[in-house]
């Protein structure tokens, strides 16, 4: 699994394993509205730690395990915040979480859980990660946190079992849309091939993430597409609790829609606005390489990757209109159209 672009820091590798192996129980909370990388990677790390005799449990921080991720190995071992009692943990390991505010109810209900009293091992690939751990293994040049974790567990000396390999491949496929994003490198593909050699199967991952969908998802997309609007260079739609209830759908079922909208001709940026009590949670995407949505999201207190980011817009309709106009203006200012020379 060697390659270019990033190299794990040896001291961080050793220190992270030292802290994790010294724990009575490691809790691995996920980011809210968890995706494949955000859940599969903690599952893989938890399985790896058990090889050292360390008890470790993954926790879905907002209490909902997406139906599309039910195929993951050991998914029935995952705890759901608000449904299951929290175990007595003494170390936290956060994988694919760029900001402690993204931990949903786990952190919002009791900020003391993440105030540093309990040591945090931070494993991520977001460029906007704010290095909140006592150990930070953050590699923004990796295509997914699962790609980082694949290298990390190898460095720890973990046996790459079939379930671990399946989870790590699911994380890579989820964040790269099946090895199709611009973040996908030759190293990413070599890592994926190594995981397949270890017993991982791409077919159930592709089926669950990209092919098979419940009727509720089709209903949700129909409502969302019916509400599509333009603000300058930004194509966007809004989803409310009423729409989710009408369709019987969960928030995770809308996540692929923002990528679908990003491919619309004439757009520089796409967004989905999820209405909530404080305003709107927003997912943002771009296809042009010079339109960095992480920079845009950071202006509104969010973050992410250059092509995929998110933030929270607080306020009323006026705040929403300001946000939409600002995103469009920033995208236009960043974009440098390719000029075609005259014959």
Image (cartoon, rainbow, N blue to C red):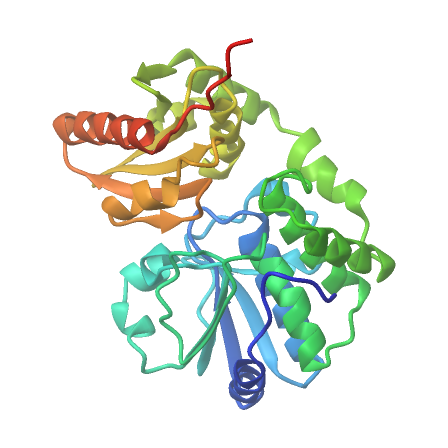
Q: Is residue 246 above or below residue 311?
A: above
- Residue for point 55% across, 65% down: 58
Whether residue 129 is visible here, answered yes or no, is yes
Query: In this image, 208 relative to 332: left or right?
Result: right
Residue that sits furthest to the top in the current view? 343
Query: Which quadrant holds the C terminus?
Result: top right
Query: In this image, 186 relative to 230: left or right?
Result: right
- Residue for point 54% across, 47% down: 35
Query: In this image, 297 relative to 318: left or right?
Result: right
Q: In this view, does 170 lie above or below 96?
A: above
Q: Is residue 175 above or below residue 20?
A: above
Rendered image quadrant of residue 337: top left
Query: Residue 290: x and y, percent?
Result: 43, 36
Query: Residue 206: x and y, percent?
Result: 72, 38
Of residues 4 and 33, the one nearer the viewer is 4
Rendered image quadrant of residue 68: top right
- Residue for point 67% across, 69% down: 151
Query: Residue 149: x and y, percent?
Result: 62, 66
Rendered image quadrant of residue 331: top left
């Amino acid at each position: 699994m060697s390659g270019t672009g990033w190299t794990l820091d040896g001291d961080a590798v050793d220190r992270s394993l030292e802290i994790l192996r010294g724990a009575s129980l490691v809790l691995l909370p996920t980011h809210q509205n968890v995706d494949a990388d955000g859940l599969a990677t903690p599952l893989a790390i938890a399985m790896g730690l058990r090889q050292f005799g360390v008890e470790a449990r993954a926790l879905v921080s907002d209490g909902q395990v997406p139906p599309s991720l039910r195929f993951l190995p050991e998914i029935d071992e995952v705890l759901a915040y608000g449904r299951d009692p929290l175990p007595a943990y003494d170390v936290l390991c956060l994988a694919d979480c760029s900001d402690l505010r993204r931990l949903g109810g786990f952190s919002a209900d009791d900020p003391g859980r993440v105030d540093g009293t309990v040591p945090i091992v931070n494993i991520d690939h977001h460029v906007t990660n704010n290095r909140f751990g006592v150990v930070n293994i953050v590699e923004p040049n990796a295509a997914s946190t699962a790609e980082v974790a694949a290298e990390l567990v190898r460095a720890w000396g973990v046996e790459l079992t079939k379930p671990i390999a399946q989870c790590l491949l699911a994380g890579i496929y989820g964040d790269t849309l099946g090895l199709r994003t611009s973040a996908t490198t030759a190293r990413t593909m070599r890592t994926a091939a190594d995981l397949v050699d270890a017993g991982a199967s791409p077919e159930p991952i592709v089926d669950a993430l990209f092919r098979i969908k419940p009727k509720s998802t089709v209903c949700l997309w129909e409502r969302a597409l019916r509400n599509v609007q333009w603000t300058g260079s930004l194509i966007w739609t809004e989803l409310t609790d009423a729409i989710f209830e009408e369709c019987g759908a969960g928030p995770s079922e809308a996540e692929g829609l923002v990528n679908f909208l990003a491919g619309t001709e004439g757009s520089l940026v796409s967004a989905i606005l999820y209405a909530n009590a404080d305003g709107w949670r927003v997912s943002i995407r771009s296809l042009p390489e010079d339109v960095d949505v992480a920079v845009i999201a950071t202006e509104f207190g969010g973050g992410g990757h250059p092509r995929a980011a998110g933030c929270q817009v607080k306020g009323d309709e006026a705040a929403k209109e300001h946000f939409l106009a600002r995103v469009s203006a920033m995208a236009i200012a960043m974009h440098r159209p390719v000029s075609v020379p005259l014959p």
